[in-house]
Image (spheres, rainbow, N blue to C red):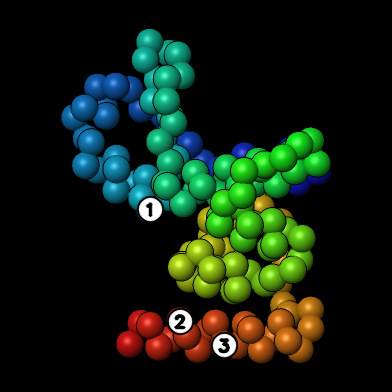
Amino acid sequence: MFLRGLYKTMTVAIISRTDLARNTREIVEQVRRGQTVLLQSYGEDQIVLLDVLDYRLLKALGAYGLREMGEVEPDSIGDVVRSYLSQEISLSKAAEMLNTSRYDLLERFERLGVPLRFGAQTVDEARVEVDAAQDAGTHRA
């Protein structure tokens, strides 16, 4: 199962409570840029700080992995991740549905160890990818 290697690609910065108190703004910015931070106190792990979309993606991945063990609360990010992992939608379509760029989602999935699929599997999927790329270009202008 893909969840076994989930954390292999995540890099974690370890800080103390004092570091957090002294450098809160800088640490928050690092987390927002994708750095996962583990706060320790006296050598004991206390909390983990990670970007909110990374958190939601991890939560959705966990729900996907547990889907056969019982009912899971539906949520939009979970539905998108499930659709992507079930090969119902492309990475570009998943990014569009999550209101982020394909490249941002690709980077997040790589960081979180999510299996990646490249290239359209069908003509319809290729059209969706082209449309998503064109939409992304018009939103930046």
- Precedes in sequence: disc 1 or disc 2: 1
What residue type is disc 3 on? Asp
The location of residue 123, given as percent across then percent down, is 76, 89
The residue where tag 2 is placed is 136
The reply, left or right, for residue 13 in relation to residue 65 is left
CA distance separating discs 2 and 3:
9 Å
CA distance separating discs 1 and 2:
20 Å
Which quadrant would the C terminus be assigned to in this image? bottom left
- For residue 33, the mark is 1
The location of residue 35, given as percent across then percent down, is 42, 45
- Precedes in sequence: disc 2 or disc 3: 3
- Precedes in sequence: disc 3 or disc 1: 1
The residue where tag 3 is placed is 131
Mark 1 residue crowding within 10 angstroms, few (<14) / some (14–19) / many (20+): few
Displayed quadrant of residue 5? top right
Mark 2 residue crowding within 10 angstroms, few (<14) / some (14–19) / many (20+): some
The answer to whether any part of residue 8 appears in the image is no
- Image point (60%, 73%), residue name: 93
- Image point (54%, 82%), residue name: 132
Displayed quadrant of residue 115? bottom right
The answer to whether any part of residue 120 appears in the image is yes
Q: Secondary structure at mark 3?
A: helix
The reply, left or right, for residue 2 in relation to residue 37 is right
- Image point (23%, 36%), residue name: 24
Displayed quadrant of residue 124? bottom right
Please, which residue is most extreme toward the top here? 42
CA distance separating discs 3 and 1:
27 Å
The location of residue 56, given as percent across then percent down, is 51, 47
Q: Secondary structure at mark 1?
A: loop
Mark 3 residue crowding within 10 angstroms, few (<14) / some (14–19) / many (20+): some
